[in-house]
Amino acid sequence: MGTGALAFNTGSAATPAVSAHTYKWAEVIVRAHKTSSLAMLQRHLRLDVAAAKALQNKLISNGVIGAHANVYGLHQATNPLFDGLFPQPSKIAQTGKNLNEKMSSSIRNDVENLDFETDVGEDRDANLEIPITSLYNEAEWSSHLVA
């Protein structure tokens, strides 16, 4: 036991020993993923079922993960590494939608405030009066063109 190995009591006769190094890696992995499951600990740390269960119990007792698993068997990390650092996809979509609405409104206002009146002698197409609603419909817009 003096070599840095931790023995976790799982209630079985043969208690698996997990090193402190493995425990620290498990803590980092769990906090990075925001969740923990036995399969995830086994996969990432290459542990057998008993060692993964002992490690998960130790993570629970140290408060790294919550004691109760959800219906999928996932325990939530109590202090995730990246909590709130990255925006959620729904917030990104809402920001894009808001930006699109602002840009569309701005363009619509700019087009509505255009002054199409000029002297007849300057340009023969300058006096074309195209309704603002027609700018969005190509078929109507092309019917206003002078040949």
Image (cartoon, rainbow, N blue to C red):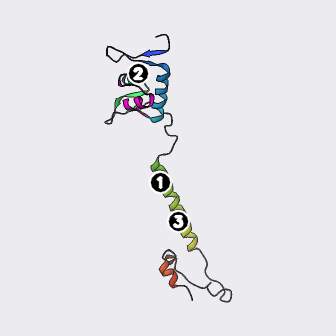
Q: Which mark is residue 58?
A: 2
Identify the secondary structure beneath mark 2. helix
Q: Is residue 132 above or below residue 94?
A: below
Q: How far apart in space, not on screen, are marks 1 and 2 (Cα)?
A: 41 Å
The three-letter code of the residue at mark 1 reads: Gln
Disc 2 residue type?
Answer: Lys
* Lower sequence index among marks 1 and 2: 2
Q: Which residues are magenta?
A: 35-49
Q: Identify whether 52 is placed above or below 147.
A: above
Q: Disc 3 vs disc 2: which is toward the camera?
A: 2
- In the rendered image, residue 117, in percent from the top left (x then y), is placed at 62, 83
Graded by Cα atoms within 10 Å as few (under 14), some (14 to 19) or many (20 or more), the crowding at tag 2 reads some
Whether residues under marks 1 and 2 lie with C-beta atoms below 8 angstroms apart, the answer is no
| Amino acid residing under circle 3 | Ser
* Nearer to the camera, 68 or 133: 68
Count of marks, rendered view: 3
Whether residue 64 appears in magenta in the rendering, the answer is no
Residue 137, image x and y in percent? 48, 76
Q: Which residue is mark 1?
A: 94
Main SS, magenta region, reads: helix
Q: Please, which residue is most extreme toward the top here?
A: 2
Q: In this orientation, does residue 138 appear?
A: yes
The numbered mark, 3 or 2, whose residue comes first in the sequence reads 2
Disc 3, SS? helix
Nearer to us in this view, 60 or 114:
60
Residue, disc 3: 105
Residue 79 showing in the rendered view: no
